[in-house]
Every structure is written in structure tokens, then in C-alpha cells.
Amino acid sequence: MRRPGLDLITEISACRLCAGRFAATASGHAPRPVVWFRPGARLLIVGQAPGARVHASGRPFTDPSGDRLRGWMGVEEGAFYDLGRIAIVPMAFCFPGYDAKGADLPPPPLCATTWRDRVLAALGPVELTLLVGGAAQRWHLGTRNVTATVAGWRDHAPRVFPLPHPSWRNTGWLKRNPWFEADLLPALRARVKEVL
């Protein structure tokens, strides 16, 4: 008997569409799709793309960004990686690589145009979606300014919460925007607890 969601996971895991693109980056790596979803999950986390640590581990958010995101959500690691409850579907499944200056490259649009609609259809309806970073917010909300989008979080809650990327690079942003921790995070934690 065919299992459409699981067949799709196998297909994405075998994807090598960006092999040439990744080989030409400063990191010169091969594709390694990090696929972390199962149909029926209640919460969807939409990130940017795996970083080098996640590329090595094969598990999403196994880095300081993941620690910060779990703190924002108020969940322990076990709940975060429970495929029956949380799906983690970034805008690109593979680490995009580094440019010549050592900076992360953006998620290749080819990944989202190839897989995104099929993955969302396989997931089915979710109760809560977290849009983590600009690429996720542009795709799902059509917005361009992360600060303005996150500041307007009440326009999308309780089904969608736009978030900045939890990278250490955004520590300054968090200090300049204390409303994020004071107002948005308590609402986010309450909603995550309700959904899970």
C-alpha cells in the first residue's frame, strides 16, 4: 500500500537538483536534504535552510539557533523533535553553502518551487505555523520587512506567528525590540502549549 507522505519524504531525501550549485560554493559540498515532517503534525515550523551544523547532523536546529527557538517556544527537545506533533519544513531542505567571504548563501528558490506545495498538501491542515525569518515570511505572507512583519504578529495570530531568525546574529535586533520578549513570546508559548 502506498503512503503518499512517506513516499514524498523518500523522494525529497534523494533530491540532487542543486548538486552543481552546491559543488560551486566555497563550501563545495554535496546535497543532504534534512527532511523532518510527517503528515498529521499539529505545528509547522518554517525556517530558512539548514546551516553547516545541521548539514552534518541531519537533524534540524541542532545548533544554538535551535536552542534559542526552543526557548522562545517553551518546549523541551523531546517535544520539539516529535514528528507526530511538530513538522520542520524550511524553505530549502539542504545547506545552501557559503559564499567566498564565508557568509551563508540564501535558500535556493528551486527547492521551494519544486517541493513546497507538495509538502504542505501532504502535511494537511496544521493548527499553528511559525514563520522563522524573512524567506519564510516572504513566501507565506508576501511581506518583505521582518521587523514590521514580526511587530504585526497579532494580525496573523493565533494560527501564524512570524518570528525573526533565532541566530546569534539577531541578538542586537532582540535588544532593540524588547516588545518581542515582553509581548509576543508569552502569547507564542501559550499558543504552542495549547496546540501541543
Image: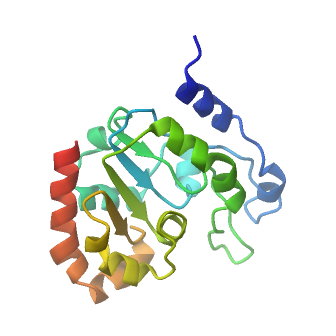
- Residue ID at (59%, 49%): 116
At x 72% / y 56%, what residue is drawn?
Answer: 110
- Please provide percent x and percent y for residue 77: 29, 44
The N terminus sits in image quarter: top right
- Provide residue 76's location: percent of width, then percent of height: 24, 46
Location of residue 166 with respect to 176 vertically, above or below: above
As drawn, which residue projects farthest toward the bottom? 176
Q: Where 170 falls versus 1 (above or below)? A: below
Q: Quadrant of residue 167?
A: bottom left
User: In the image, is 16 to the left or to the right of 150?
Assistant: right
Towards the viewer: 158 or 90: 158
Q: Position of residue 191 (x, y in %)?
A: 19, 55
x, y percent for residue 100: 75, 75
As drawn, is 3 to the left or to the right of 165?
right
Compared across the picture, whether 32 is left or right of 146 comes to right
The foreground one among 169 and 81 is 81
